[in-house]
Amino acid sequence: MKRLFNAATLCSMLLLAASCGEKLGGEENAPTVNKSVTFTPERDKLLKNPFSGWAIYAGLGSGISDNFWEIYDNFPSSEGNIKVSDYASLLLIRIKWSEIEPTEGLYAWDSANTTAEAKRYRMLVEGAKERNLRVVLSLRMDSRDLDVWAVPKFVQDKGAKGFTSGSKSVWTPYPDDPVFQREYKKFLQALATQFNNPDVGAYVQGVGIGKWGEYHTCIYSTNDESPREAVLDWVCDTFMEVFDQIPVVINYHRLIGTAKDSGGADPQSERLLAKAYNKGLCFGSGAFGMKSYYSKWERDFIAQYKYKVPVTMEGGWVRGSHSMAAINADGYATWADVRQGEYDEARGAFVNVMDLRYNSNISISETWSWFNEAFSLVKGFIKEGVYRIYPNKISYPESLAEGASFTISSRWCNLGWSYCPTNVVQYEQRYKVAYALLDSRDEVAAIFFDEAEKPSDWIKETPVSYNFSDKLPGGIKGDYTWAVAIVDVKKGNVPGIQLSVKDNVKTADGWVKIGNVTIK
Amino acid sequence: MKNFRILTAILAIATLFGCQRHNVDNYYSHSNFYIQLTASQQTIVLDEDNPDATALKVSWTPAKEYGDDFLMTYSYSMEVVTSTAAPISEYEDEGNFAREYSNAELQNMLVGHFGQKTSTYCEILIKATATYAGPYVIIPDESVVRVKVKTYGPKQFGADKVFIGGSSVGESIELEPNENNKDIYIFTGSLKAGKFHFPVVYGDENNAIVPEGNVDTPVSNSAMSAGVVDAAKIAGEWVLSESSEYRVTLNMAAKTVSIIKTEDIFDFDKLYMAGTAVGDEMVEFQQTLENESVYAYYGELKAGTFYLPIEYNEATSLAIVPAGTSHDVQDGVAVSFSQVRMASAGSQAYWTIPADDKYRVVLDVTAMTVTIYSPATAKKNLTVSFNKTYTDDGPVANPYEMEVTELWMYGGFNGFNKDADLPFTGFQKKNKLVQSQADPAIFVYYGAALPRSGNAAFNLKVTYFHNNVYCYGSTADAKRNQYDGFTTMTLGVPDKMVAGQGDNRYAYFVIPEGANYIMANIETLDIVIDKK
């Protein structure tokens, strides 16, 4: 298709831009005239921003293929072979404690650890780094339904109390057991040495206790639910203390912390989850698309936290183990319908992250299903789901006197249904809107922070405008370029969240060039 | 931010109330539909010979401006109204308010993305929309045009009018679609030795339906594949070597042509049994539940004449009689049959039933054979032996032997409901499998969709007096008093049964959703559950 550029429109835009001068407060008695620029949004390109995008799922058990990355780099799709990491931002690793620390103090990242699980761990983590994927930790400390212990034997040897289950008599510690709690915290601290860093870790998905690590069907030492709230307090506080640089997600399950695995919502669940929210945790669910397990309670619950916390989604239906009859009974005619159902539910919950689950038989995996039965939805989430924030319009001074005051006006937009979660505890002192003067080498000569411009306020179809005023520092003269970015103040003010504008207005570091300014 | 949102909400509500005081349609149409989309043509026939030539140009004017407080976003989309494919849509962020499509681009889009047929018209709906985000709600500004486009490529096997023509026919004759099936066109009449084809008119095309490959093809007894070509490009026809009365059937859905001499046609709506072996009144000859190609009767016949009248188009003018001149029954042997006028049936042409007795008569309409079994050759009911524990029909006498003449469904599928007049819980007459008239080893349930209470499970018992009787269970592993077994059945997929009075009584079949048909063969131990 040929696109005809409308010359008349171009002319009118240029005239409009030229006539968009605004008199704004500048140096006393010498009002500056600002120039306006608008930015064309980047609507398609994958931006691997924090807490956003598709998560590739993997694990450390024998089910994971040793040539995982080879398969995922040449993955069959309805549009030919693709590289999954070209569409994903995250690698979620399902982790059992016993896989990471089979004997006390020997971790999977230690070269002396030569277990198959440790090798897989290193293969996955190194592969993630090579593909610019941040790692999500999905923990499981409950052995039920497993053939192996989720928790290493030394925890029991140290006196932790628990229970056995299944034909293999696998052991699970009681979550309220003090020895378990002490040792678990040590383990989390060890994990934090590797992942409590947003350059490597993305967030922690779930706190690991309860059946399947989903924090329901809990068995406490008291054989009742009396420790429920105390355990929730402990586990939330512990995770928030240990992971102070990456967010922590808790499952918003209607039976959170109860001994039950199904049925109606427990009346205390909403209050306890609110408590977790107030402690700084984010929310996620693993039942998206299952109309019995993800229904009114879950929808109503998460609606209360819309744009307050980021939300992660994981589909509940599993192509490799659920029958067509089962999905038919849930109102889906095909697996493509299931994917659409999950997508619609994800959009309804304004989720930040969606899942690409794994199966060793690739052709029945959810990842295969998404790329072969719903590829348009994979792209759809990248295009319309992940947050895409950008300055739609900025007016700036083109000429200033040394040390003069200036005002920059901006209008910010978000094209995605999810929001940019810079309000979460671990991010709020990290990411800030900054304007900079770049020199001829695109290096920052001066930087100005606007604390009023909060990316977490920018939501879809609601542009937000600001006027930011500051004063140039002395000693800066000459020709510069105004630029804007959301910088990571803990990393020397480098751009930390990519803005969704075309690459041709960005520097190599990710600053968005606004326009030139001469300082006399 | 909070105050800003409250103000937005107040303004939105005020706008809505304001609207109520106006004539809403005029108000919005005047103020919101400012953008104008135009297309270079309203109807396009895509040109296959010029793929790169421009076929369609579209452009639109800028939308209404609402000032600097509003962010305006343009989007552009194309969709085909009759397609289920998603619209092709894009944002226009750079002010390019025009699009241009070549013949090949439109062809690929319509056939490749929207799934439209080749050489067929379709309607494209093209839309330019401007949406606004700002301090209060503004209805999007939108303009739509519709363009009719005809794709190129292989012709469609379709017709608005159908004729039969060629040297076998002489002047072409228009055919009418069959009343019951509009895809079927039938010609019945004389055809000379020569060639024939089907001229058709389809939309703005004059085409011809000819043998697949467009080459001369001698007629055969089976359905012949057909293709469609431009009427001016006929290179091959069906070749008829013998002049006669024929029936020619064109099936537009199957894309086939069938030809048969009228004397060889076997059409019927119903079949009956008649003759002195049956009595004064004809008795309907029933289709079996397990095979729609088989009709069967198992019962008394008297010594005398026997034939099968055919009802077709509400007339009973023909009857099935033995081929040839013999009246003898070839006991248990499948024999070919002829059709004769009813006037001859029973007087000149018929089978002679040798003696009063119980016979099984089976007609296979696919094989075109009739088999009459006397008691000497007829297959017997199968007998089972089991430990009888109930006395409802007489004292316990073990080992107990029983001829199997019916099968009863038993399990949680019906919530273990029972009929009031039956002695044991779980048994209902409506959930009984009846014995086939054609084969006493076959039992069929065909009726209402089966209930799926509980685990939707059942197995088959030979009688309704007790649940511990001889049983046909599933192959699932089961252990009495320990655990039950379940085989999840799939509609239309056969499975095996396990016969006996052991643990198989605790092995169940799980009924698929919507099932209303069960066929069990207690000789081969096959079972199939289906939805019919």
Image (spheres, coloured by chain):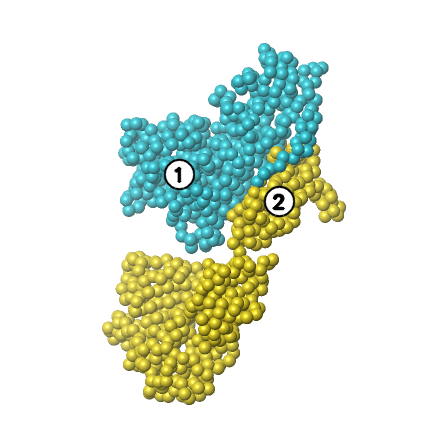
The residue sitting at 52% across, 60% down in the picture is B234
| Amino acid bearing label 2 | Leu
Residue B124 rendering spot, x and y as whole percentages: 60, 49
Quarter of the view holding residue B265: bottom left
- Does residue B500 sit above or below B96 in this rendering? below
Question: On the rendered structure, is A376 left or right of B528?
Answer: right
Question: On the rendered structure, is B278 left or right of B18?
Answer: left
The residue sitting at 33% across, 34% down in the picture is A120
Identity of the residue furthest to the left in this view: B399
Q: Please give the label number shown on residue B56.
A: 2
Give the number of the mark in front: 2 or 1. 2
Q: Secondary structure at mark 1?
A: loop
Q: Which chain is home to disc 1? A: A
Q: Viewer-proximal residue, B277 or B259?
A: B259
Asked if marks 2 and 1 fall on the same chain, the answer is no
Q: Please give the label number shown on residue A74.
A: 1
Residue B214 rendering spot, x and y as whole percentages: 48, 60
Could you tell me which quadrant the N terminus of chain B lies in? top right
The residue sitting at 47% across, 75% down in the picture is B244
| Amino acid bearing label 1 | Asn
Quarter of the view holding residue A83: top left
Few, some or many residues within 10 Å of mark 2 (<14, 14–19, 20+): many
Question: On the rendered structure, is B226 left or right of B102?
Answer: left
The picture's colour for chain A is cyan
Q: Viewer-proximal residue, A69 or B226?
A: B226
Can residue A178 be seen at all in this image of the molecule?
no
- Does residue A475 sit above or below B399 in this rendering? above
Few, some or many residues within 10 Å of mark 1 (<14, 14–19, 20+): few
Dots 2 and 1: beta carbons under 8 Å? no
Quarter of the view holding residue A243: top left
Q: Which chain is home to disc 2? A: B
